[in-house]
Image (spheres, helix red, strand yellow):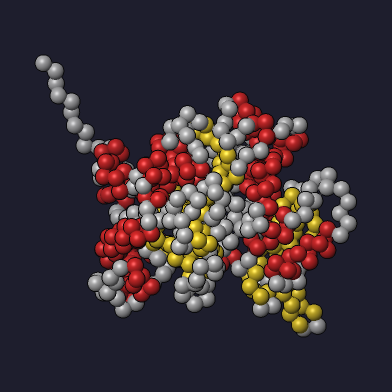
Amino acid sequence: MTDAPMASRLPLYHNAIDWDGFWRDYPVPDVFAETVFKWPMERIRELQERRFREMLAVGWGNGFYAERWRRAGLEPGDIGGLDDIGKLPTFNSDDIKDSQQAAPPYGAITGIDRRLDGARQPLKLQTSGGTTGKARPTLYGVAEWEMNGLQIARSLYLQGARPGEAIQIPATCSLANLAWAFYKGAHDYLGLMPLTTGSGVVTPTAKQIELLFDYDVDILVSFPEYLTQMATTAREADIDLRDAGLKFITSYLGPDTEDLLRQELEELFGCPVYDNYGTHEISHASFEGPDKDGMYAMEDCLYLEILDVETNLPVGPGETGNLVVTSLFRRIPPLIRFNLRDLARFTHVDRQSALGSWFRRMDKFLGRSDDMVKIRGVNVYPMACLNAVKSDPRTTGEWFVLAERSRQDGVIRDELRIKVEVAAGAGALDGLREILEQRLRADLGLRVGVELVDQGALDDLANIGREGKARRLLDRRFEGGQ
């Protein structure tokens, strides 16, 4: 007679939720591709309505939301469904910071006690990048952490990833989210072998390229800035990255509205490049498919709105505004009408795609509204410089925007100076500054000055080729008390 195994009282991850129910609600990649992804709009809307009403109940039980909603004159029952969502106040990262300062370190918005609830289910901590201030912590329960990988896995599958292939992830598994999400999506949901090589600081770029060839990698994920750095390193070593035989690259192309950046990367690596959008709070929000006809919003997981930057009212299809997100699955913390202050627009909202989906599709990520600077009455978004800088092959495609203020004869004048990197070996630069200034004036609606700098000169200033997002703006107008 053998002793019966002793039951554990620990909060084991794999016992934390009803997995069959979870995957029934949020199908795994191949099932998703043939079911929810192809549902008609009416059925998608019905699902969103049900999940939104569930999130309303969660919100009323959360001190952060209950206080804000009552301050707006609302009571439980006032919001019937998505048609009433505009009655709920939006909030942004500043409100999260205020909540976390008032109730450190996680804020009332999290809705749980880390020590108490962490003894019941495993929790994971990730943070924002901290590019606009102190990084914001975000907790994940088991369901939230699973969705972090599952959403990525769905997009990779629809982009063409299949079991037995290898994906290289040159990003560090740190408090930043990208590497974790791609590792989990590849390993747990697709049967992809992840090569978690870390950033260029962890694994030098030359070694990254060596591993790409040595382990017969099929898929590469990285930001464009690092992909172009890999290409530069490969060229210096007389290596043709097209010989790696990559199946595709998945990346975050930003405001590449003319596809100049995509075309450059596809030529350098010899494979398709697909665009994506997401944040650490909402996970993977939208992704491009092989049709390259806009980024599919993950509509069974998120309800997306685009609101005018000034009025906070909805804009029409094709119009640009702030992306406002309601997560239909997040409970730790709930996110209900979270204004990301990321500029976006819907390109397709009422027609079936070539892949058979009715999901709404977004255009490129167009920059951040809180990165906007107003110069002589014109709103300028630094990311809008991309197409102009990429339009001339003599540049490296890297730029940095300086807003400056001068005072002459008692008159204050604000100016923009755009630092643009020139590629090593670019040859004659005749007319380059004038060409860029003319194109930037057309794109920005404002006369700007261009300063040509050597390749690599912006690495520190713009955080290029390093962990985290590139920085594109420094506003010096108010330095020195001017």
Q: Residue 366 at x, y = what percent? A: 58, 61
Whether residue 237 is situated above or below residue 372 in the rendered picture:
above
In the drawing, does residue 251 fall left or right of residue 442? left
In the drawing, does residue 140 fall left or right of residue 235? left
Considering depth in this image, is 30 or 85 the residue closer to the camera? 30
Residue drawn where x is 57% and y is 57% of the image: 364
Question: Can residue 128 be seen in this snapshot?
Answer: no
Question: Can residue 268 be seen in this snapshot?
Answer: yes
Among the 4 quarters of the image, the one containing residue 63: bottom left
Considering depth in this image, is 297 or 1 the residue closer to the camera? 297
Residue drawn where x is 29% and y is 54% of the image: 113
In the drawing, does residue 421 fall left or right of residue 179? right
Q: Residue 32 at x, y = what percent? A: 38, 45
Considering depth in this image, is 173 or 306 the residue closer to the camera? 306
Whether residue 171 is situated above or below residue 350 in the rendered picture:
above
Q: Residue 400 at x, y = what percent? A: 70, 58
Kindly give the residue lying farthest to the left in the view shown: 1
Whether residue 239 is situated above or below residue 147 in the rendered picture:
above
Residue drawn where x is 26% and y is 49% of the image: 116
Considering depth in this image, is 150 or 98 the residue closer to the camera? 150
Whether residue 107 is situated above or below residue 283 in the rendered picture:
below
Residue drawn where x is 54% and y is 49% of the image: 291
Q: Residue 148 at x, y = what percent? A: 41, 46
